Image (cartoon, helix red, strand yellow):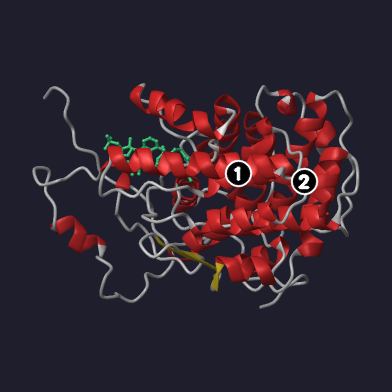
Amino acid sequence: MEGKDGATRCAGRPSKTPNLRPKEANVMTFAEARSARTHESTQVAAGLDGIVVAETRLSSVDGHRGRLIIAGHPVAELVATHRFEDAAALLLGRTALAPAIGQGRLEAFERLGSLGGALDAGTAMAGLRGAIAQLDLRDDAQTPPRLVGAVAVYTCAWARRRRGLDPVRPDPDASHASDLLRMLSGETATTSRVRALDAYLTTVSDHGMNASTFAARVVASTRGDMVSAVTAALGALAGPLHGGAPGPVLDMLDAIGTADRARAWLQAELTGGQRIMGMGHRVYRVRDPRAEVLERVVRGLDACAPERLELARAVELEAERLLGERHPGRELRANVEFYTALLLEALDVPRELFTAVFASARVAGWCAHVLEQWQNGKLIRPLSRYVGRA
Ligand code: COA
């Protein structure tokens, strides 16, 4: 049944065990999986690399062909045709979400006074995690737009508080991207900046079974609530191997300074055992399609200095070459974070906020995965192999 603002799915947690889907050819039943393994034969799938843990209608990541489909649309097409709120609506099975997300921003702003010291945390992600964890929301159709609104408001409030400024009251009628930029700077952003941020938010709104989405689904699989699932996801996203990479990408560009120094700098990092941020991906064996989309968006932005872009491209190519020499046969190419860094920098988003802005978009995907997990999933409970003393 369709709700007031287009809710087409039950957003609540199931009160009893959902019916198992009919058996499909490539899905092992629990009984089959259990009978197929013994303590002795249990192999460790490190990092669950290559393991399929769920079926999803939300997004498809084809790592070999570099194709990403979000809510039924190739990512470049989705970005060209949908605002972030509309992409979020598709993910969440709603017909319209912008008014509810606007309302969610307003509600979150009005709750700022009751957050205590959560937003005084040392990092934006710690502030966000603390503030979101305090939400006491009943799981219903309003929870996802409330969470989407709250992540943006808390992100901007943390940043302004850090600079000794008052938070900016949201405008529930503005687009999410435009309001986010205004809540950050206090000024209305130009159309081209709003479009650029909107393209970014849409591009990263969902991405298969990434680590933070998996964290959210693990919580949802216990029939945990949506706020707890999103809180867990925030913790996973904060790590430098996941959503924490774009700030260090800029640090790297600053440290390199000019293209002619790229090779020596990168070589020294790799020799020292460091990872090159913004490069490599668990699933993609080609350049991340989101890097393609975001590079195009950055190139269309006046605010991005051409020399910065050229430096970035030179560093990307050099990193690709060096990683190729060290890991022949394993394509390690630019991932989404590489051009995210340039895009958010051009939009004057402070570096320490990059991961939180990422969360402002990905929260839509997390909520959609939680709904899907509640509907179709079962308790996620893998095994471990004991290697301690008997
Ligand atoms: N810099 C240096 N070495 C890298 C690397 C990078 N960015 N990415 C992968 N490698 C190395 C690994 O250390 C590994 O080396 P080893 O075989 O000697 O142990 C080899 O390449 C293969 O790694 P792989 O199995 O593909 O890595 P993964 O799937 O475990 O890791 C990432 C994927 C994303 C965590 C990894 O590429 C990385 O750390 N990238 C930098 C952080 C980043 O940009 N994160 C954002 C992801 S969207």
Question: Nearest the camera: 61 or 113?
Answer: 61
Q: In x, y percent, where is residue 326?
A: 29, 37
Identity of the residue drawn at 11% across and 48% down: 38
Task: State the residue position of label 2.
Answer: 303
- Residue 134, compared with residue 149, is above or below; it is above
Q: Secondary structure at mark 1?
A: helix
Say if residue 320 shows up in the picture.
yes
Q: Residue at x 56, y 69 (%)?
A: 71
Residue located farthest toward the left when viewing the structure as drawn: 40
Amino acid at pointer 2: Ala
Along the viewing direction, whichever of 135 and 240 lies nearer the viewer: 240
The image shows residue 211 at horizontal and vertical percentages of 45, 45
* Quadrant in which the C terminus appears: top left
User: What residue is shown at x 40% (from left), y 70% (from top)?
Assistant: 19
Q: Amino acid at mark 1?
A: Glu
Say if disc 2 is inside 8 Å of ligand 1: no
Q: Is residue 158 above or below residue 330?
A: above
Cβ–Cβ under 8 Å for marks 1 and 2: no
Side (left or right) of 221 relative to 323: right
Classify residue 323 by image quadrant: top left
- Numbered disc in front, either 1 or 2: 1
CA–CA distance between discs 1 and 2?
Answer: 14 Å
Q: Position of residue 188 (x, y in %)?
A: 90, 49
Q: Is residue 107 visible?
A: no
In this rendered view, identify the residue nearer to me: 359 or 96. Answer: 359
Q: Which residue is mark 1?
A: 310
User: Image height check: is 352 above or below 52?
Assistant: above
The part of the image, by quadrant, that contains residue 201 is bottom right
- Ranked by sequence position, the earlier of labels 1 and 2 is 2
Quadrant of residue 44 within the rendered picture: top left
